[in-house]
Image (cartoon, rainbow, N blue to C red):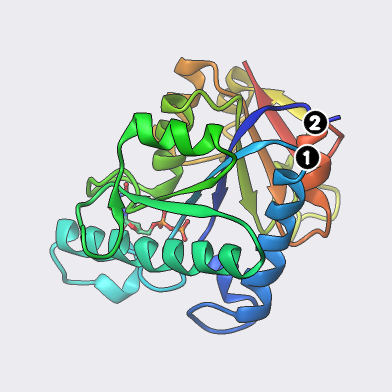
């Protein structure tokens, strides 16, 4: 039995690279989409926010010396490319997806209109929110929290490389332990990085729980939506 009716899934752009140095790895995107398909087949409404780090990240090295806002707009455009790739892969895998952009690029993708997004979700279509929040100085984590709150998602699922939030960096400390669940307040007290600050604050204010899990673990997404002990639940 699914634990949720509507979820917001945040995928990082970097996850799309697979073992490649940049861009979109075909086998990786297909595998990710198949994981998403499994949960849509359970009757769960799925909205997705995808990052752009595999193509361009405004805050990172490639943009050194650039005007930050311009670099961020480039980053947002990168998320549009990833969103289109994701939706098209979904189409190839027999799903129906719609891309909605926070920045108007009408010839390429329809604009984000909340009631329309809600309608698509009710129709069982996957909605991919592109171009982040549409504003520079933010990240796609914040877009995930924002859209998640707007569409009334019951949870934000943050797919990362690591399968949860740990007491210490598991790559450096073999004693590091995964939290099965942790409250927003405890995460702050312990100075644990769950999502970026703005995203974390928004989820906390809106009482929107976050689940951090690994998209690279086969079947993890399915276990998460069934409410099983997978990854870390950040709760109110
Ligand atoms: N970005 C932005 N505003 C937003 C979302 C994204 O300016 O609301 C830009 C920012 O430069 C960011 C880039 O788009 O670095 C790609 O997004 P992100 O770094 O979140 O991607 P991810 O790390 O998830 O691949």
Q: Secondary structure at mark 2?
A: loop
Quadrant in which the C terminus is drawn:
top right
Quadrant in which the N terminus is drawn:
top right
View extreme (bottom): residue: 20
Residue 27 at least partly seen: yes
Q: How many marks?
A: 2
Image spot of residue 41 (x, y percent): 75, 46
Q: Is the CB of mark 2 within 8 Å of ligand 1?
A: no
Residue position for label 1: 42
Out of 228 and 138, give the one closest to the viewer: 228
Asked if the residue under mark 2 is in contact with the one under mark 1, i.e. CB atoms within 8 Å, the reply is: yes
Out of 94 and 78, give the one closest to the viewer: 94
Q: Is residue 56 above or below residue 156?
A: below
Image spot of residue 153 (x, y percent): 55, 27
Which mark is first along the chain, 2 or 1? 2
Image spot of residue 68 (x, y percent): 18, 59
The answer for how far apart the CA atoms under marks 1 and 2 are is 7 Å
- Residue 2 badge: 2
Query: Residue placed at 84% from the left, 55% from the top?
Result: 174
Query: Residue placed at 39% from the left, 41% from the top?
Result: 143
Out of 96 and 104, give the one closest to the viewer: 96
Query: Residue placed at 56% from the left, 54% from the top?
Result: 96
């Amino acid at each position: 039995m699914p634990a949720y009716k509507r979820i917001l899934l945040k995928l990082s752009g970097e996850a799309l690279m697979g073992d490649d140095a940049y861009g979109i790895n075909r086998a990786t995107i297909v595998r990710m989409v198949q994981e998403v398909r499994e949960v849509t087949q359970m009757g769960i409404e799925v909205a997705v926010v995808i990052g752009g780090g595999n193509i361009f990240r405004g805050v990172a090295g490639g943009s050194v010396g650039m005007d930050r806002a311009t670099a961020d707009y480039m980053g947002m455009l990168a998320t549009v490319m990833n969103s289109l790739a994701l939706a098209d892969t979904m189409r190839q895998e027999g799903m129906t997806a719609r891309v909605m952009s926070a920045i108007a690029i009408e010839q390429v993708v329809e604009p984000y209109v909340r009631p329309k997004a809600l309608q698509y979700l009710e129709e069982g279509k996957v909605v991919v929110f592109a171009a982040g929040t549409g504003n520079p100085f933010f990240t796609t984590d914040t877009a995930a929290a924002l859209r998640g709150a707007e569409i009334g998602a019951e949870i934000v699922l943050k797919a990362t490389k690591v399968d949860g939030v740990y007491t210490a960096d598991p790559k450096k400390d073999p004693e590091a332990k995964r939290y099965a669940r942790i409250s927003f307040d405890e995460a702050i007290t312990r100075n644990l990085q769950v999502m970026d600050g703005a995203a974390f604050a928004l989820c906390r204010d809106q009482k929107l729980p976050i689940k951090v899990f690994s998209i690279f673990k086969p079947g993890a997404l399915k276990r998460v939506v069934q409410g099983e002990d997978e990854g870390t639940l950040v709760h109110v």
